Amino acid sequence: MELYGKKWAVRELRRRVGNMDQIAGIRTVELADGNERPTRAALIHTGSGLELTVLLDRCLDISSASFCGKVMGWRSTTGDVAPAYYEAEGIRWLRSYFGGLVTTCGLMNVGAPGEDSALRGNGLHGRIGNTPAKNIQVCQEWQGNDYVMSVSGTMRETSVFGENLTLRRTISTKLGSRSFTLHDVVTNEGFKKTKFQLLYHCNLGWPTVDEGSELITPTRLIAPRDAVAEDGKKDWWKCDPPIHQYAEKCYYHDMAAERNGAVTVAIVNDGFARGEGFGVYIKYNKRELPRFVEWKQMGEQDYVVGFEPCNCGVEGKSIDDKLGLLHTLKPGESRSYTLEFGPITEEREVRALRAARNKIKTKFVDSYKEFVKKP
Protein backbone atom coordinates (compact mmCIF):
# COMPACT_ATOMS: atom_id res chain seq x y z
CA MET A 1 0.00 0.00 0.00
CA GLU A 2 1.06 3.65 -0.47
CA LEU A 3 1.32 6.20 2.31
CA TYR A 4 3.24 9.50 2.49
CA GLY A 5 4.49 8.98 -1.07
CA LYS A 6 6.03 5.58 -0.39
CA LYS A 7 4.86 1.99 -0.87
CA TRP A 8 4.74 -0.09 2.30
CA ALA A 9 4.39 -3.76 3.10
CA VAL A 10 1.77 -4.24 5.81
CA ARG A 11 4.25 -5.83 8.20
CA GLU A 12 6.78 -3.02 7.80
CA LEU A 13 4.13 -0.38 8.40
CA ARG A 14 2.79 -2.14 11.48
CA ARG A 15 6.30 -2.38 12.91
CA ARG A 16 6.48 1.41 12.94
CA VAL A 17 3.27 2.26 14.86
CA GLY A 18 1.95 1.14 18.22
CA ASN A 19 -1.69 1.84 17.39
CA MET A 20 -3.16 2.39 13.95
CA ASP A 21 -4.90 5.58 15.10
CA GLN A 22 -1.44 7.17 14.97
CA ILE A 23 -1.88 7.39 11.20
CA ALA A 24 -5.56 6.67 10.45
CA GLY A 25 -8.78 5.72 12.18
CA ILE A 26 -12.26 6.51 13.43
CA ARG A 27 -13.03 8.10 16.78
CA THR A 28 -16.60 8.41 18.09
CA VAL A 29 -17.36 11.53 20.12
CA GLU A 30 -20.30 13.52 21.49
CA LEU A 31 -20.73 17.18 20.53
CA ALA A 32 -21.50 19.21 23.63
CA ASP A 33 -21.77 22.92 22.77
CA GLY A 34 -25.12 24.72 22.58
CA ASN A 35 -27.85 23.18 20.47
CA GLU A 36 -25.49 20.62 18.92
CA ARG A 37 -25.61 18.77 22.26
CA PRO A 38 -25.77 15.76 22.57
CA THR A 39 -25.17 14.76 18.91
CA ARG A 40 -22.93 11.74 18.43
CA ALA A 41 -20.29 11.94 15.69
CA ALA A 42 -17.60 9.82 14.07
CA LEU A 43 -14.31 11.54 13.18
CA ILE A 44 -12.46 9.81 10.35
CA HIS A 45 -8.91 10.44 9.11
CA THR A 46 -7.22 8.34 6.45
CA GLY A 47 -3.57 9.42 6.71
CA SER A 48 -3.67 11.04 3.27
CA GLY A 49 -4.97 14.37 4.55
CA LEU A 50 -8.64 13.42 4.15
CA GLU A 51 -10.73 14.11 7.28
CA LEU A 52 -14.50 13.68 7.76
CA THR A 53 -17.05 14.36 10.46
CA VAL A 54 -20.03 12.00 10.24
CA LEU A 55 -23.05 12.89 12.40
CA LEU A 56 -24.44 9.62 13.76
CA ASP A 57 -27.57 11.35 15.07
CA ARG A 58 -28.21 13.13 11.77
CA CYS A 59 -28.57 10.29 9.24
CA LEU A 60 -24.78 9.74 9.13
CA ASP A 61 -24.58 12.87 7.01
CA ILE A 62 -21.19 14.48 6.38
CA SER A 63 -21.10 17.59 8.53
CA SER A 64 -17.62 18.61 7.42
CA ALA A 65 -14.83 17.32 5.21
CA SER A 66 -11.38 18.55 4.28
CA PHE A 67 -8.27 17.47 2.40
CA CYS A 68 -4.85 18.63 3.61
CA GLY A 69 -6.58 21.42 5.49
CA LYS A 70 -8.65 22.66 2.53
CA VAL A 71 -12.38 22.54 3.17
CA MET A 72 -14.47 20.47 0.75
CA GLY A 73 -18.00 21.37 1.92
CA TRP A 74 -19.93 24.50 2.88
CA ARG A 75 -21.06 25.13 6.45
CA SER A 76 -24.17 27.18 7.17
CA THR A 77 -24.66 29.72 9.95
CA THR A 78 -26.63 27.18 12.03
CA GLY A 79 -23.66 24.91 12.66
CA ASP A 80 -24.36 21.37 13.82
CA VAL A 81 -27.82 21.04 15.36
CA ALA A 82 -29.09 18.08 17.38
CA PRO A 83 -32.19 16.33 15.99
CA ALA A 84 -34.23 17.35 19.05
CA TYR A 85 -34.32 20.88 17.62
CA TYR A 86 -35.72 19.81 14.24
CA GLU A 87 -38.81 21.79 13.14
CA ALA A 88 -40.74 19.81 10.53
CA GLU A 89 -43.33 22.32 9.36
CA GLY A 90 -43.03 24.45 6.24
CA ILE A 91 -39.48 25.63 5.55
CA ARG A 92 -38.31 25.47 9.18
CA TRP A 93 -35.96 22.64 8.12
CA LEU A 94 -33.60 25.54 7.34
CA ARG A 95 -33.20 26.25 11.07
CA SER A 96 -31.18 23.05 11.49
CA TYR A 97 -29.64 22.83 8.01
CA PHE A 98 -25.89 22.76 8.72
CA GLY A 99 -25.05 22.35 5.03
CA GLY A 100 -22.02 20.11 5.17
CA LEU A 101 -20.65 18.07 2.32
CA VAL A 102 -23.77 15.85 2.41
CA THR A 103 -27.26 16.45 3.78
CA THR A 104 -29.82 13.76 2.92
CA CYS A 105 -33.34 14.76 1.84
CA GLY A 106 -36.45 12.55 1.82
CA LEU A 107 -37.79 9.96 2.22
CA MET A 108 -41.43 11.02 2.08
CA ASN A 109 -40.80 14.49 0.69
CA VAL A 110 -38.09 16.34 -1.21
CA GLY A 111 -38.26 20.01 -2.11
CA ALA A 112 -41.20 22.31 -1.47
CA PRO A 113 -43.32 21.56 1.62
CA GLY A 114 -46.60 19.72 1.21
CA GLU A 115 -49.80 21.72 1.49
CA ASP A 116 -50.58 19.89 4.74
CA SER A 117 -47.07 20.20 6.22
CA ALA A 118 -48.38 21.77 9.44
CA LEU A 119 -50.57 18.69 9.99
CA ARG A 120 -48.33 15.91 8.71
CA GLY A 121 -44.87 17.47 9.13
CA ASN A 122 -43.92 16.84 5.48
CA GLY A 123 -42.01 20.10 5.28
CA LEU A 124 -39.08 21.19 3.15
CA HIS A 125 -36.82 18.25 2.20
CA GLY A 126 -38.43 15.76 4.56
CA ARG A 127 -37.40 14.20 7.86
CA ILE A 128 -34.68 11.63 7.14
CA GLY A 129 -31.77 14.06 7.50
CA ASN A 130 -32.80 14.74 11.12
CA THR A 131 -33.17 11.07 12.05
CA PRO A 132 -30.66 9.46 14.46
CA ALA A 133 -29.06 6.17 13.49
CA LYS A 134 -29.54 2.88 15.31
CA ASN A 135 -27.45 -0.31 15.12
CA ILE A 136 -24.27 1.72 14.65
CA GLN A 137 -21.21 -0.30 13.68
CA VAL A 138 -17.63 0.96 13.45
CA CYS A 139 -15.07 -1.15 11.61
CA GLN A 140 -11.30 -0.61 11.59
CA GLU A 141 -9.36 -3.64 10.43
CA TRP A 142 -6.84 -5.04 8.00
CA GLN A 143 -8.45 -6.76 5.04
CA GLY A 144 -5.54 -8.21 3.12
CA ASN A 145 -3.22 -5.33 2.29
CA ASP A 146 -5.86 -2.67 3.00
CA TYR A 147 -6.65 -1.10 6.35
CA VAL A 148 -10.39 -0.55 5.94
CA MET A 149 -12.43 1.93 7.96
CA SER A 150 -16.21 2.22 7.91
CA VAL A 151 -19.13 3.40 9.99
CA SER A 152 -22.68 2.14 9.43
CA GLY A 153 -26.11 2.78 10.87
CA THR A 154 -29.82 2.43 10.16
CA MET A 155 -32.40 5.23 10.07
CA ARG A 156 -36.11 4.44 10.09
CA GLU A 157 -38.88 6.68 8.72
CA THR A 158 -42.23 5.38 9.85
CA SER A 159 -45.55 6.26 11.44
CA VAL A 160 -48.58 4.36 12.68
CA PHE A 161 -50.88 3.71 9.68
CA GLY A 162 -48.19 5.15 7.40
CA GLU A 163 -44.89 4.31 5.75
CA ASN A 164 -42.26 1.96 7.19
CA LEU A 165 -38.98 2.65 5.39
CA THR A 166 -35.39 2.16 6.50
CA LEU A 167 -32.19 3.65 5.16
CA ARG A 168 -29.05 1.65 5.93
CA ARG A 169 -25.93 3.77 5.35
CA THR A 170 -22.25 2.91 5.26
CA ILE A 171 -19.47 5.50 4.99
CA SER A 172 -16.23 3.75 4.04
CA THR A 173 -12.64 4.51 3.13
CA LYS A 174 -9.19 3.05 3.76
CA LEU A 175 -5.72 3.95 4.95
CA GLY A 176 -4.01 6.34 2.54
CA SER A 177 -7.15 7.03 0.51
CA ARG A 178 -7.99 10.49 -0.82
CA SER A 179 -11.64 9.57 -1.33
CA PHE A 180 -14.55 7.98 0.50
CA THR A 181 -17.74 6.17 -0.45
CA LEU A 182 -21.31 6.63 0.78
CA HIS A 183 -23.47 3.54 0.22
CA ASP A 184 -27.19 3.48 1.04
CA VAL A 185 -29.85 0.80 0.97
CA VAL A 186 -33.47 1.97 1.22
CA THR A 187 -35.93 -0.81 2.15
CA ASN A 188 -39.69 -0.94 2.43
CA GLU A 189 -40.24 -2.94 5.61
CA GLY A 190 -44.01 -2.44 5.47
CA PHE A 191 -46.72 -4.43 3.73
CA LYS A 192 -47.93 -1.92 1.17
CA LYS A 193 -46.39 -0.17 -1.81
CA THR A 194 -44.79 3.12 -0.80
CA LYS A 195 -43.82 6.07 -2.96
CA PHE A 196 -40.61 7.75 -1.85
CA GLN A 197 -38.13 10.47 -2.79
CA LEU A 198 -34.39 10.70 -2.22
CA LEU A 199 -31.98 13.57 -2.85
CA TYR A 200 -28.35 13.99 -1.81
CA HIS A 201 -27.75 17.67 -1.02
CA CYS A 202 -23.98 17.87 -1.65
CA ASN A 203 -22.88 21.37 -0.69
CA LEU A 204 -19.58 22.73 -2.01
CA GLY A 205 -18.15 25.96 -0.65
CA TRP A 206 -15.04 28.13 -0.51
CA PRO A 207 -12.20 27.64 -1.46
CA THR A 208 -13.62 25.34 -4.15
CA VAL A 209 -16.37 27.86 -4.83
CA ASP A 210 -14.98 31.30 -5.57
CA GLU A 211 -14.97 33.98 -8.22
CA GLY A 212 -13.80 32.27 -11.42
CA SER A 213 -14.62 28.74 -10.27
CA GLU A 214 -16.43 26.52 -12.78
CA LEU A 215 -18.80 23.59 -12.69
CA ILE A 216 -17.69 20.72 -14.91
CA THR A 217 -20.59 18.39 -15.64
CA PRO A 218 -21.57 16.11 -18.58
CA THR A 219 -24.87 17.96 -19.06
CA ARG A 220 -27.02 17.08 -22.09
CA LEU A 221 -30.16 19.03 -21.18
CA ILE A 222 -30.68 21.82 -18.68
CA ALA A 223 -33.81 23.66 -17.53
CA PRO A 224 -34.14 26.62 -15.15
CA ARG A 225 -36.52 26.01 -12.26
CA ASP A 226 -38.19 29.43 -12.47
CA ALA A 227 -37.93 32.96 -13.82
CA VAL A 228 -35.14 33.83 -11.39
CA ALA A 229 -33.01 30.99 -12.73
CA GLU A 230 -33.98 31.86 -16.31
CA ASP A 231 -32.17 35.16 -15.83
CA GLY A 232 -28.51 34.20 -16.06
CA LYS A 233 -29.02 30.63 -17.27
CA LYS A 234 -26.16 30.94 -19.77
CA ASP A 235 -23.79 31.29 -16.81
CA TRP A 236 -25.10 28.28 -14.89
CA TRP A 237 -21.56 26.86 -14.85
CA LYS A 238 -19.79 30.01 -13.56
CA CYS A 239 -19.25 31.10 -9.96
CA ASP A 240 -19.39 34.76 -8.95
CA PRO A 241 -17.93 36.55 -5.94
CA PRO A 242 -20.34 36.80 -2.99
CA ILE A 243 -23.27 39.04 -3.99
CA HIS A 244 -25.42 41.01 -1.57
CA GLN A 245 -29.03 39.74 -1.42
CA TYR A 246 -28.45 37.14 -4.14
CA ALA A 247 -31.56 35.14 -5.05
CA GLU A 248 -30.89 31.40 -5.35
CA LYS A 249 -31.05 29.77 -8.77
CA CYS A 250 -31.85 26.10 -9.41
CA TYR A 251 -31.31 24.17 -12.63
CA TYR A 252 -32.38 20.68 -13.64
CA HIS A 253 -29.73 18.67 -15.48
CA ASP A 254 -29.91 15.54 -17.57
CA MET A 255 -26.45 13.98 -17.56
CA ALA A 256 -24.66 11.92 -20.19
CA ALA A 257 -23.54 8.81 -18.32
CA GLU A 258 -20.79 6.32 -19.09
CA ARG A 259 -21.80 2.87 -20.30
CA ASN A 260 -21.99 1.55 -16.75
CA GLY A 261 -24.18 4.50 -15.70
CA ALA A 262 -21.42 6.43 -13.92
CA VAL A 263 -21.54 10.22 -13.84
CA THR A 264 -18.76 12.45 -12.50
CA VAL A 265 -19.43 16.09 -11.62
CA ALA A 266 -16.98 18.59 -10.21
CA ILE A 267 -16.32 22.17 -9.19
CA VAL A 268 -12.80 23.57 -9.50
CA ASN A 269 -11.42 27.01 -8.70
CA ASP A 270 -9.16 28.98 -11.04
CA GLY A 271 -5.94 28.63 -9.08
CA PHE A 272 -4.33 25.71 -10.90
CA ALA A 273 -2.16 27.92 -13.12
CA ARG A 274 -0.73 29.49 -9.94
CA GLY A 275 -0.26 26.17 -8.16
CA GLU A 276 -3.17 26.98 -5.83
CA GLY A 277 -5.90 24.98 -7.53
CA PHE A 278 -8.45 22.96 -5.64
CA GLY A 279 -11.72 21.27 -6.41
CA VAL A 280 -14.11 18.52 -5.41
CA TYR A 281 -15.63 15.73 -7.48
CA ILE A 282 -18.66 13.55 -6.88
CA LYS A 283 -19.33 10.32 -8.72
CA TYR A 284 -22.74 8.62 -8.75
CA ASN A 285 -24.71 6.25 -10.97
CA LYS A 286 -27.48 7.58 -13.17
CA ARG A 287 -29.23 4.19 -13.16
CA GLU A 288 -29.71 4.63 -9.41
CA LEU A 289 -30.23 8.41 -9.37
CA PRO A 290 -31.61 9.44 -12.77
CA ARG A 291 -32.09 13.14 -11.97
CA PHE A 292 -29.80 15.96 -10.92
CA VAL A 293 -30.38 19.46 -9.54
CA GLU A 294 -27.89 22.33 -9.37
CA TRP A 295 -28.41 24.80 -6.52
CA LYS A 296 -26.49 28.01 -7.16
CA GLN A 297 -26.43 30.37 -4.18
CA MET A 298 -23.86 33.17 -4.52
CA GLY A 299 -25.01 35.15 -1.47
CA GLU A 300 -22.89 36.51 1.34
CA GLN A 301 -22.27 33.71 3.87
CA ASP A 302 -24.85 31.66 1.95
CA TYR A 303 -22.08 31.10 -0.59
CA VAL A 304 -22.48 27.61 -1.93
CA VAL A 305 -23.14 25.44 -4.95
CA GLY A 306 -25.23 22.35 -4.36
CA PHE A 307 -24.78 19.22 -6.47
CA GLU A 308 -27.94 17.16 -5.92
CA PRO A 309 -28.15 13.68 -7.48
CA CYS A 310 -31.69 12.44 -6.89
CA ASN A 311 -34.59 10.27 -8.03
CA CYS A 312 -37.01 13.21 -8.08
CA GLY A 313 -37.38 16.96 -8.52
CA VAL A 314 -37.50 19.74 -5.94
CA GLU A 315 -41.00 21.00 -6.69
CA GLY A 316 -42.46 18.82 -3.93
CA LYS A 317 -43.90 15.33 -3.78
CA SER A 318 -47.37 16.28 -5.06
CA ILE A 319 -45.93 17.78 -8.26
CA ASP A 320 -43.81 14.72 -9.02
CA ASP A 321 -46.79 12.50 -8.27
CA LYS A 322 -48.95 14.37 -10.81
CA LEU A 323 -46.16 14.02 -13.39
CA GLY A 324 -45.87 10.27 -12.70
CA LEU A 325 -42.25 10.56 -11.57
CA LEU A 326 -42.37 9.06 -8.08
CA HIS A 327 -40.37 5.90 -7.43
CA THR A 328 -42.18 3.10 -5.60
CA LEU A 329 -40.95 0.36 -3.30
CA LYS A 330 -42.93 -2.86 -3.09
CA PRO A 331 -43.22 -4.60 0.30
CA GLY A 332 -39.79 -5.99 1.18
CA GLU A 333 -38.10 -4.32 -1.81
CA SER A 334 -34.75 -2.53 -1.49
CA ARG A 335 -32.87 -0.04 -3.66
CA SER A 336 -29.16 0.72 -3.40
CA TYR A 337 -27.30 3.98 -4.02
CA THR A 338 -23.55 4.65 -4.07
CA LEU A 339 -21.67 7.96 -4.24
CA GLU A 340 -17.93 8.67 -4.19
CA PHE A 341 -16.37 11.94 -3.03
CA GLY A 342 -12.83 13.21 -3.36
CA PRO A 343 -10.60 16.28 -3.88
CA ILE A 344 -9.11 17.55 -7.13
CA THR A 345 -5.58 18.87 -6.67
CA GLU A 346 -3.84 18.47 -10.05
CA GLU A 347 -4.41 20.24 -13.36
CA ARG A 348 -4.33 16.97 -15.30
CA GLU A 349 -7.47 15.90 -13.43
CA VAL A 350 -9.21 19.09 -14.51
CA ARG A 351 -8.11 18.63 -18.13
CA ALA A 352 -9.55 15.11 -18.20
CA LEU A 353 -12.90 16.29 -16.84
CA ARG A 354 -13.06 19.15 -19.33
CA ALA A 355 -12.20 16.85 -22.23
CA ALA A 356 -15.09 14.55 -21.32
CA ARG A 357 -17.43 17.53 -20.90
CA ASN A 358 -16.45 19.08 -24.23
CA LYS A 359 -17.65 16.01 -26.12
CA ILE A 360 -21.22 16.81 -25.06
CA LYS A 361 -23.45 19.52 -26.49
CA THR A 362 -25.67 21.09 -23.86
CA LYS A 363 -29.20 22.10 -24.84
CA PHE A 364 -31.69 24.25 -22.90
CA VAL A 365 -35.38 23.57 -22.37
CA ASP A 366 -37.80 26.08 -20.91
CA SER A 367 -39.46 24.40 -17.95
CA TYR A 368 -39.40 21.46 -15.54
CA LYS A 369 -42.51 19.93 -17.08
CA GLU A 370 -40.92 20.10 -20.53
CA PHE A 371 -37.63 18.80 -19.15
CA VAL A 372 -39.09 15.66 -17.58
CA LYS A 373 -40.81 14.70 -20.84
CA LYS A 374 -37.48 14.46 -22.68
CA PRO A 375 -36.04 10.96 -23.16
Image (cartoon, helix red, strand yellow):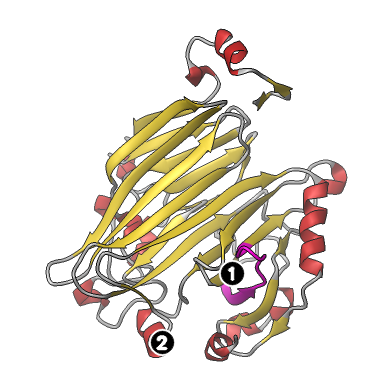
Tell me if residue 51 is in the magenta stretch. Answer: no
In the figure, 143 relative to 203: above or below? above
Residue mark closest to the camera, 2 vs 1: 2
Q: Which mark is residue 324?
A: 2
Under circle 1, the secondary element is strand
- Residue 326's spot in the image, x, y percent? 39, 79
For the C terminus, the quadrant is bottom right
Pointer 1 residue: 294
Q: Is residue 56 above or below residue 350?
A: above
Q: Is residue 164 left or right of residue 278?
A: left
Kindly identify the residue that appears in the image at 58 percent across and 77 percent down.
252
Q: Is residue 183 left or right of residue 286?
A: left
Which segment is the magenta one?
Answer: 246-262
- Image quarter for residue 189? bottom left
Q: Amino acid at mark 1?
A: Glu
Image disc number at residue 178:
none
Q: Image quadrant for the N terminus? A: top right
22 or 137: nearer the viewer: 137
Pointer 1 local density, CA inside 10 Å: few below 14, some 14–19, many at least 20: many
Q: Residue at x 60, y 65 (%)?
A: 261
Measured as percent of width and height from the top left, residue 296 is found at 60, 68
User: Does residue 162 show up?
Assistant: yes
Q: Please report the residue visible at 54 percent of the width from the left and 11 percent of the height from the top.
A: 17
Vertical position of residue 137 compared to residue 233: above or below: above
Number of residue marks: 2
How far from the left and from the top, in percent, is residue 23?
55, 21
- Disc nearer the start of the sequence (2/1): 1
Residue 271 appears anywhere in the view: no
The residue under the point 42% across, 42% down is 54
The amino acid type found where label 2 is placed reads Gly
Left or right of 319, for residue 275: right
